[in-house]
Amino acid sequence: MKNEIFKRLISSVLLIPIVIFIIVKGSILFNIFILLCFFISAYEWHAMSKKKNYSIFGLIFLIISFYLVYKIRNDFNGEYFYLLFVILICVATDIGGYIFGNILKGPKLTSISPKKTYSGMLGGYILSILCVYFYLNISFNEIQIDMTNHIIFIVIIISTVSQLGDLLISYFKRLSKIKDTGRIIPGHGGLLDRIDGMIFALPFSYILFILNIFN
């Protein structure tokens, strides 16, 4: 258990700055990055769902999801602001759920993913709200948004979609009788294991951004 936590920590410390740099940098580097992530995710999904009648639908969804990631990064005036905003919520939700769930434990959330607890769900909300608060107040953001009740509500909604996406991928893993979608990230499993919430939260958030929900 401690070894897995150590691997997870080291992987996160190495990968997070690289991903942030690529998102902020944008351009061809970002395009290559999301294409690579798509192909890895598609491969993991195929390996997990092959010969299942829902396999093609999952692949189509991945295509749409990654295309909208590209759109979020390139279609809005804030450039990387909106993409980092959603990814931050998803990562904080995942980390908050992991920490609070392991420390507080408590009642299980669902049988689909036995490790998920109500305390973890609450922890995901709390950490995502805190992280967004600090994100909105750092100086390098060109977009200035106050942390109002309206923004907190948006954070909770996006966090909820991320958690539901996590549970849905967990459901498909149970159908395939596997623990992880791959082994590409030490301590984390496959890439799809780490972005399961994002691939649902990002398309949902794109709709919110189109509706200009910050105003």
Image (spheres, rainbow, N blue to C red):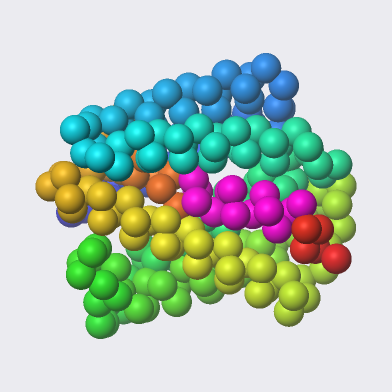
Residue at the location (25% across, 77% down)? 108
Residue at the location (40% across, 34% down)? 59
Give the prevailing secondary structure in the magenta stretch. helix
In the figure, residue 101 lies in which quadrant?
bottom left
In the figure, residue 151 lies in which quadrant?
bottom right
115 is higher (above) or lower (below) than 207: below
Question: Outermost residue, front direction?
Answer: 53
* Left or right of 161, for residue 28: right
* Left or right of 98, for residue 87: right
Q: Position of residue 17 (x, y in %)?
A: 56, 36
* Left or right of 203, for residue 40: left
* Left or right of 46, for residue 158: right
In this rendered view, identify the residue nearer to me: 15 or 181: 181
**Does the magenta-highlighted stretch encompass residue 209?**
yes
Task: Please count the marks in the image.
Answer: 0
Work out which quarter of the rendered image holds the N terminus and state it.
Answer: bottom left
For the record, the magenta segment spans 198-210
Work out which quarter of the rendered image holds the C terminus and state it.
Answer: bottom right
Can residue 28 be seen? yes
Residue at the location (24% across, 63% down)? 113
Question: Outermost residue, left direction?
Answer: 177
Question: Outermost residue, bottom direction?
Answer: 107
Q: Position of residue 30 (x, y in %)?
A: 63, 25
**Does the magenta-highlighted stretch encompass residue 89?**
no
Can residue 190 be seen? no
Q: Position of residue 166 (x, y in %)?
A: 38, 56
Residue at the location (26% across, 56% down)? 171
Q: Position of residue 105 (x, y in %)?
A: 27, 77
155 is higher (above) or lower (below) than 26: below
